[in-house]
Image (cartoon, rainbow, N blue to C red):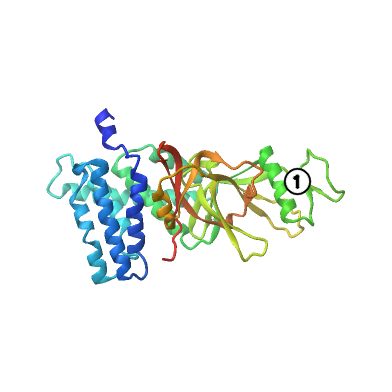
Amino acid sequence: MDDNEELKFTLHPDDPAHFLKLLSALRLLIKHTITDADIEEADQLIREYCTGLIKLYGSSCVKPNHHYATHTTTFVRNFGPLHDFWTFLFERLNKVLKSFKTNNHSGSELETTFFCEFHRMCQSSRLTYSLLQQGTQTLQCEAAEIMLKASSEERGTVAGLAALSKELDEVHADAGQQYGLSPRRQCKIMTNNTYQLLAQTICFQSPETPVHCRSNCPVVPHSLPLNREATFFDYVTVKGKRYYASRSVRVKSSSLVQVGLPHADRERITYAHGEITEIFQFDQDIHHKNESMWFARMRWFKSWTGERDDIWDKFAAMNVRLWEIEEYHDKDTQLPALISPQWICGHLALKTVSIGANRIKVWATIDLAKAVL
């Protein structure tokens, strides 16, 4: 990519804060019910956002769609709020179709070729997914993993459609699943840190059943030594959403979550935010109930307490939070390092932003859980 292309796609340092205006407008417009006051506020925010784009990027960035956006509130006033209105899947597929290179095909040859190739790749993706369900140690599963690895290295429209088909299959498979674990799993020895955290967590949650690490001396005579083996999973499905362990997939984006931590009275909840690093199952029957235990190991974000622009506080209702970049709470925090996966509430979107007069870089996150508006 040359210098001109890099400059073209450079995000202005003030754009994340400016984008909060559009976010606030969308939040108002997609409510289940909307008032005239909400419509007026959304209209003002949209116009401020479009005007701000000119200040940040110049008038050349303004497109016809920005003008169309100023009429949105008129349509909402006439036809009601936009809840469940936008067809995001259609827009995504439309983008894929437009990016397909024609290579001078004409006379419906392009359309026919594309249509056949699209369905072929969808069928191939579904076949691959069905092979994965045959069990982790089977030849079918191994072949499917090789096929997925090969397809992930492809580029272009066809590869994009295959990825889209696979994603749709995964969403359909998870949609009605309240709780589940990934087919891919590995039984192995826990790290020392995870092992010690597990012992501390069990002792805290079940003081009547004391346990200890095998390398430590028991505090009480009836303390049980913990096994070091556990079964680790790539992801957990909670209420139809997949949450990945970052140490298994080496990618953080699907591991950033909001967690609802229940209080002892089970009536109050404290929300915390962080990264899932491990998801594992512990099978030692320490409670004599023949039941397994499941845990997600967390790294908790540290809140940013330094200087910030007023706009971040003005739009605090959008649940945009600021965190110290690449900083996490240490083990002395009151937040638990191991949680029940069922406490996970939803994904987080994360972006590095610059704030304050000194343009300090911090993390900004927003909850992606679908809220009742």
Q: In this view, does 72 lie above or below 276?
A: below
Q: Is residue 55 left or right of residue 222?
A: left
User: Hey, which residue is sitting farthest left in the picture?
Assistant: 107
* Front in this rendered view, residue 6 or 77: 77
Residue 331: percent from left, percent from top: 65, 42
Q: Is residue 123 above or below residue 175?
A: above
Task: Give the labeled residue for mark 1.
Answer: 226
Callout 1, which amino acid? Leu
Residue 20: percent from left, percent from top: 36, 52
* Residue visible at 40% across and 40% down in the picture: 152
Residue 177 can be seen in this image:
yes
Q: Quadrant of the N terminus?
A: top left
Q: Is residue 55 left or right of residue 343?
A: left
Residue 277 can be seen in this image:
no
Secondary structure beneath label 1: loop
User: Hey, which residue is sitting farthest right in the picture?
Assistant: 221
Residue 193: percent from left, percent from top: 67, 39
Q: Is residue 10 above or below residue 237?
A: above
